[in-house]
Each structure stands twice: as C-alpha cells, then as structure tokens.
Image (cartoon, rainbow, N blue to C red):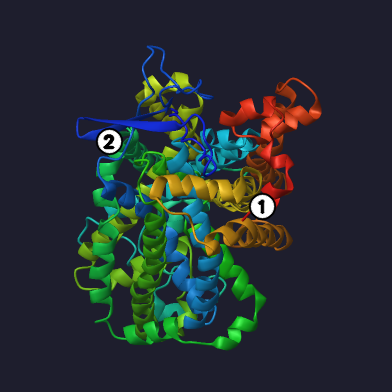
C-alpha cells in the first residue's frame, strides 16, 4: 500500500511551482486511516509524481495506529523478547559484570540508537513496508526482500520456542511439577537430583529438569541426529497450532487488532518480572547472585571478545534489520515524532535487559546457595536457562505450580509480540509491494501463518531440536548484519544523509543533529562492516551438546543464509537489466528516487555530483 511521497524542499529564495502534501484523515471502527497526495498550488505546472490511486480511482488509504501508545507498545513488545531474559544477563556476568555495560552502552550510542532511529524514520516518511520504502533508491530494493526473508525464516523456529513455553504452562497445572523427580517414564539411569550429583560422572549426570526438557518435551533420545527426525509429536504440534491461531487472530486485521493485543503482551512481562524479583530477593543466596551479576572487573575490557559480544548483543537486541521497525512506523501519522520514539523505545529495551538480570541472578544465586555449588555451575544462557535452570529453581519454592504458571505466562507474552512483529514485517512488506494482496489481507495472513506452521513441524519432531539449532545458527546471523549494512549504505550514501535529514525535518519540524548524521554516514556503516567481517572470521559450525552436524547440514544452513543475502545483488542486476538505455542512464535511474526520474530525463542526477557524496 503506498501513499504519495512528501516533496523535496525547494531551495530558499527560489520562485516557482509549490507542492503541498495534503493528508486526509478519517476514522473507521476506532482506527484512523490516512491518505496523502501531492498537489500544486494554483497557477503552477503539472506535478511530477501524481498520487497513487486504487482501481476505483480514489486515493490510496493507509491504516494508522488508533493511539500512539499502540505503536510504542508494539515496538517495545517486539524489541523486548526472550533474549533480554536469557542472553544479556549471562553476557554481563561472563564479561566483567558491570564493566560490560561500558562497551554495551558505547555501541548502543554510536550504532544501536542511530540505526533504530533510521529505520523508524524511513518507514514513517515513506509509509511502506521493508521493500516499498526503497522507491528512494530503487537499486537497493533487494535489501527489502532480504529482511523480509530473514523475518520469515526466523518465524520458522521462533514460534517453536513459544510452543515450548505453552507446553510447560499446561504442564504446570499440577500439584507436583513433572520436572521435580527422576521416577518418570522419560528419565534415564543418569538422572539424579542435585543432592546426589556428586556420585555421578560430570559428563553423564543430568538433573530431572534437564531430562524433562530434553527427554520429556523434545524426546531427543528417540532421534539419532538431523537425518533421523521422526514424525511430529502431537503434543508439541498442538501447542504450535495454538500459537499459530493466536498469531493469526492478532494480525489478520492489521494494526487494528495487533495494536490492542500488545496492551497485554507488552506489559505483562514487566508485571511478572517485578513479581519474580520481589520473590527472588527474599531467597537465601539471592544477594550473592546479584553481587556476582554486578561485580565490576575492568580488566575484562582488555579482552577483544568482550567488545565483540557487546557489539553483537546490540545488533540483535534492538531488532534492527528485520523490517519490523519499518513496517510498524509506516502506520504512524506523518508528523509523529519518531526521534522521541526511537530514544524512548531503545532505552526501555536496554533497561529491561539490565532489570531482568536482577531477576535471573537472584534465582541463580539461590540455586547456587541451595545446592552448595559455584555460581558458574548454574549460570548459563539460551534455552537452558528458561527451560531447565529457572523451572528447577521454581520447583523448590512453596506454591511452585503457581510460580511456574506465572513464569511461563511471561515467556509466552515475551515471545508472542516478538513473533507478531516478525510476521507483520513479512505481511506488510509483501502487501505493500504486491498491490493485488491489499484487499485480501486476511487470506494472505492466513497463508503466511499456515506456511510458517508447516515448516515449523520439522522442529517439533523427535530430532526437531537439531533443525531448530540449524535454523537459529544460520537464519539471522551474518545475513542480518549484511542486510543492515546495505540498508545504512543505501540511505546515508546513495539516497544522501542530507536528503534523509530533510525528510525527517518535514515530519518532526527539525533536522537531526550533526551527531546523528555523522553516525549514519560514517560510524554505523563502519561498525556494521566490522561486525560482518567478525561474523565470518569467528564462524563456528553449529552443534548441540556433543552432537556435531554433518557437512550436508552445514551446507543447507549456508544456502539458507545466502538465499536472503543474494536478494541484494540479484535485484540490483534485475533492475539494471530492466531499464532501457545506455548503462550510465540505467545507473542514474536505478539510484535516483522514483519521484525524481523526470530530473534524470533532464540530465540532473544528484548522485553524479561531488556535493552529494560530501554532504553530511
């Protein structure tokens, strides 16, 4: 869905035709719609780019958020996800405690916030999804398809995490939690409570919670590897189906429905985290865990790996590069203050990560104290934290079933709104690009979520954890860093950071400061280029426990990663080949905004001037 593009500001003291953007707003069922068009003042010549119309001849309408808070909660809900709970606290503990905040905040300021701001402004000004916004520089539209594909790939396995949380939630409605003892049908002879772990070899012992996750939920013991998956397990398949139904009815009407769902899914985690923190700090050993979390070891800052992990966490925690921020902001009012939104939402995301560390380490300190083991024996990140260690800690509390229900409701809400954001990126990006889908959003949304469900079935088989690990390793690693790098180059260098700043001034009334412009043009692209190089240089093949993936599986993973990254060169080649004329003319049309192609006809190409490349 596309609206007219706001005009370029004419130079001061220049006389001539004046273009004015008319923004028509109407309300329907409590949701506002906007339609914008460029018109010419009386006596002026023809408009270079007439407004787009639908087949009936009327102006194109674009739905907008009913309330500003709907947008803010949607962005916060997407950015604040499971990684805020299971990744950041562990990184902070492992990399010098409070000292880790130094590189984390440094990269947040020079790259995280600028890129976050850039995507919000890009979507809001152009009012299109991740692919449609590249009418500002058509040759880069391939990066739009890159981020859409990445969001689709992530949906294949991210929904599975939510289905695990749902399975645990259902399992918690018992008088005794099923991961407390070793006398269940799924337990192996190596299962042992913490109290008896000393009698079993370290390489073989397993706690009841660990065996419940791997053997009771995943049934990984019934698979010999990724080439022996088996059939989908009906219990996890049912949970996955429930997740897909929830996603569909949250997305089928666009922001009219998703903007209301996030009032629950984006706020519930904060309520639960606060309740868990209050309970956690009252446990014996909790303060020891929190002290370990915050202990400052500045010598760790001399280790390059600490800085690399901080930079990586910034890249993935804010959610840039998935097309979600572009999609969400495209439903904003044109005059919305996206600068303030970027500061607020990115700050809340980082503060949530920091706050969740107190919750996590209060319980880890309790586990360390209860079982009389060092903290590093219980501290871990990833799925093992939220599906093994935390459930194990909860199981030792009075009223453990109630606490388990509360905890897994939090995981469910953390995951749902992030999954909603990823699906919205795909749906908005493709609907805006293929206009024939606009009147069939409900059916297209159904097609996307059902397709995601069918692929996700591979992850709920006996060997599904191997498929999950492979997707998690390749779907959104190097490819998303590459996508954001190309995005930053396309906007700051080819479209022009000065022109982009003019667009922002039209929306919010003032230009971004020199700091933001320097970050967009120099700092952020260099940072992203560094991260792409580091990602390739430090690549390690995926593994799960002692299982090593076969060569063919790694090749499939790389094909998955390359399939999204290849959209950039493939579309650029297609665009150049589809434009008639000499090669220089093709380049000129391909790098010039679509609304300025008439200037190319007159030989005026901004990108062919030195002033364009030097402007900041």
Which residue position holds label 2?
Answer: 256
Question: Residue 40 location, x and y as percent?
Answer: 44, 26
Q: Gap between marks 2 and 1, in whole Å? A: 44 Å
**Label 2 CA crowd tier, 10 Å (few <14, some 14–19, many 20+):** many
344 or 586: nearer the viewer:
586
Q: Secondary structure at mark 1?
A: loop
> Can residue 584 be seen in this snapshot?
yes
Examine the rendered structure and indicate whether residue 115 appears above or below residue 400: above
Compared across the picture, whether 347 is left or right of 464 comes to left
> Can residue 209 be seen in this snapshot?
no
Examine the rendered structure and indicate whether residue 309 appears above or below residue 470: below
First in residue order: circle 2 vs circle 1: 2
Question: Residue 550 location, x and y as percent?
Answer: 70, 49
Q: Secondary structure at mark 2?
A: helix
Which residue position holds label 1?
Answer: 549
User: In the rendered picture of this protein, how many numbered marks are placed on residues?
Assistant: 2
Q: Residue at x 50, y 43 (%)?
A: 323
**Label 1 CA crowd tier, 10 Å (few <14, some 14–19, many 20+):** some
Residue furthest top as drawn = 56
Question: What is the number of the mark on residue 587?
Answer: none
Question: Residue 543 location, x and y as percent?
Answer: 62, 58
379 or 315: nearer the viewer:
315
Q: Quadrant of the N terminus?
A: top left
- Nearest to viewer (mark 2 / mark 1): 2
């Amino acid at each position: 869905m596309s609206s007219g593009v706001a005009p370029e500001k004419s130079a001061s003291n220049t006389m001539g035709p004046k273009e004015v953007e008319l923004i028509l707003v109407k309300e329907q069922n409590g949701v506002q719609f906007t339609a914008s068009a460029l018109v010419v003042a009386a006596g002026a010549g023809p408009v270079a780019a007439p407004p787009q119309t639908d087949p009936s001849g009327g102006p194109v309408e674009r739905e907008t958020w009913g309330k500003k808070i709907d947008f803010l909660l949607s962005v916060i809900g997407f950015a604040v996800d499971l990684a805020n709970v299971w990744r950041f606290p562990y990184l902070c503990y492992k990399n010098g405690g409070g000292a880790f905040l130094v590189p984390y905040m440094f990269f947040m300021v020079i790259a995280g916030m600028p890129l976050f701001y850039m995507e919000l402004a890009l979507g809001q000004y152009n009012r299109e999804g991740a692919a449609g916004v590249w009418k500002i520089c058509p040759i880069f539209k391939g990066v739009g398809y890159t981020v859409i594909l990445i969001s689709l790939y992530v949906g294949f396995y991210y929904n599975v995490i939510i289905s695990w949380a749902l399975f645990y939630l259902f399992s918690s409605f018992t008088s005794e939690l099923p991961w407390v003892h070793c006398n269940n049908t799924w337990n192996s002879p190596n299962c042992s409570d913490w109290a008896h772990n000393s009698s079993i070899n370290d390489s073989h012992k397993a706690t009841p919670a660990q065996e419940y996750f791997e053997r009771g939920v995943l049934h990984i013991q019934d698979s010999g590897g990724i080439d022996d998956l088996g059939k989908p397990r009906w219990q996890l398949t049912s949970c996955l189906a429930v997740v897909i139904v929830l996603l569909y009815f949250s997305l089928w009407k666009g922001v009219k429905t998703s903007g209301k769902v996030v009032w629950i899914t984006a706020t519930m985690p904060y309520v639960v985290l606060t309740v868990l923190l209050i309970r956690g700090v009252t446990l014996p050993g909790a303060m020891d865990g929190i002290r370990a979390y915050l202990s400052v070891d500045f010598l760790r800052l001399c280790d390059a790996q600490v800085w690399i992990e901080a930079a990586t966490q910034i890249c993935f925690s804010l959610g840039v590069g998935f097309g979600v921020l572009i999609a969400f902001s495209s439903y904003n009012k044109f005059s919305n203050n996206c600068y303030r939104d970027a500061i607020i939402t990115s700050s809340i995301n980082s503060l949530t990560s920091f706050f969740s560390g107190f919750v996590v380490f209060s319980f880890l300190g309790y586990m360390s104290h209860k079982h009389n083991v060092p903290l590093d024996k219980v501290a871990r990140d990833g799925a093992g934290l939220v599906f093994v260690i935390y459930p194990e800690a909860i199981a030792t509390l009075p009223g453990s079933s109630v606490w388990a229900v509360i905890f897994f409701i939090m995981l469910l809400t953390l995951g749902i709104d992030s999954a909603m954001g990823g699906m919205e990126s795909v749906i908005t990006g493709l609907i805006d690009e293929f206009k024939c889908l606009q009147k069939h959003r409900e059916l297209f949304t159904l097609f996307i979520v059902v397709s995601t469900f069918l692929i996700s079935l591979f992850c709920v088989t006996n060997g599904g954890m191997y498929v999950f690990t492979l997707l998690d390793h390749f779907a959104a690693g190097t490819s998303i860093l590459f996508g954001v790098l190309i995005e930053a180059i396309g906007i700051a260098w080819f479209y022009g950071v000065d022109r982009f700043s003019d667009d922002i001034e039209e929306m919010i009334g003032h230009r971004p400061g020199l700091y933001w412009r320097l970050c967009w043009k120099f700092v952020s692209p260099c940072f992203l280029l560094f991260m792409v190089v580091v990602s390739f240089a430090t690549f390690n093949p995926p593994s799960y426990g002692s299982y090593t993936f076969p060569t063919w599986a790694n090749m499939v993973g790389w094909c998955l990663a390359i399939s999204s990254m290849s959209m950039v060169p493939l579309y650029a080649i297609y665009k150049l080949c589809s434009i008639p004329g000499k090669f220089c003319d093709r380049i000129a049309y391909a790098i010039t905004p679509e609304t300025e192609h008439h200037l190319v006809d007159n030989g005026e190409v901004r990108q062919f001037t030195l002033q364009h490349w030097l402007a900041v």
